[in-house]
Amino acid sequence: MDFFVILGFTTLCSIETKQEYWLIDFEEKNEVPAGYNASDYESKGFMESSLIQDFPLRGKGVYLRIKKRRWRHKETKEIIKRDFSFIADGSKFTQELSDFLKDASGYKARYHEQYSQLLQRKE
């Protein structure tokens, strides 16, 4: 939570399955990553938001919608952004959930697919 502000928390329900799930919106703070001089960079808004699935809570699906920032060097125009290793590489799961699922036999991506289309709201 050092890098993010929670923008909102929504309880949603699938019309098809009647199952509730939670959507939590995060926005990265406007603070240049460590190792860079803040006066040399300017915020250039956000990259496309990422939707990732985390561990269910109280039997409800949990999705995190994350808006990550990017900064541009004022002179060289180099773009920088933070590396968020808590998101599993090439996945839409948190690293912790991805590791758990690798150990769980017979898991299929049906849980994620069930809700992902409902959450494809662009902001």
Image (spheres, rainbow, N blue to C red):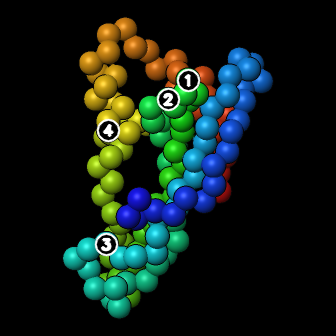
Mark nearer the viewer, 3 or 1: 1
The residue lying furthest to the front in this view is 58
Residue at the spot of label 2: 56
Q: Which mark is residue 95?
A: 4
The extreme right residue here reads: 15
2 and 1 marks in contact (CB < 8 Å)? yes
- Closer to viewer: mark 3 or mark 2: 2
The residue under label 1 is: 59
The quarter of the rendered structure image containing the N terminus is bottom left
Task: Tell me the amino acid under the disc marked 4.
Answer: Gln
Q: How many marks?
A: 4
Q: CA distance from mark 3 to mark 1?
A: 36 Å
Q: Position of residue 115 (x, y in %)?
A: 61, 28
| Mark-to-mark CA distance, 4 and 1 | 20 Å
Q: Position of residue 99 (x, y in %)?
A: 28, 29
In the rendered image, which quarter is residue 16 located in?
A: top right
Mark sitting on residue 33: 3
Q: Earlier in the sequence, mark 4 or mark 3?
A: 3
From mark 4 to mark 2, how far is it between C-alphas? 14 Å
Q: Amino acid at mark 3?
A: Pro
| Residue 113 shows up from this direction | no
**In the figure, is residue 83 to the left or right of 57?**
left
| 99 relative position to 29: left or right | left
**Quadrant assignment, res 70:** bottom left
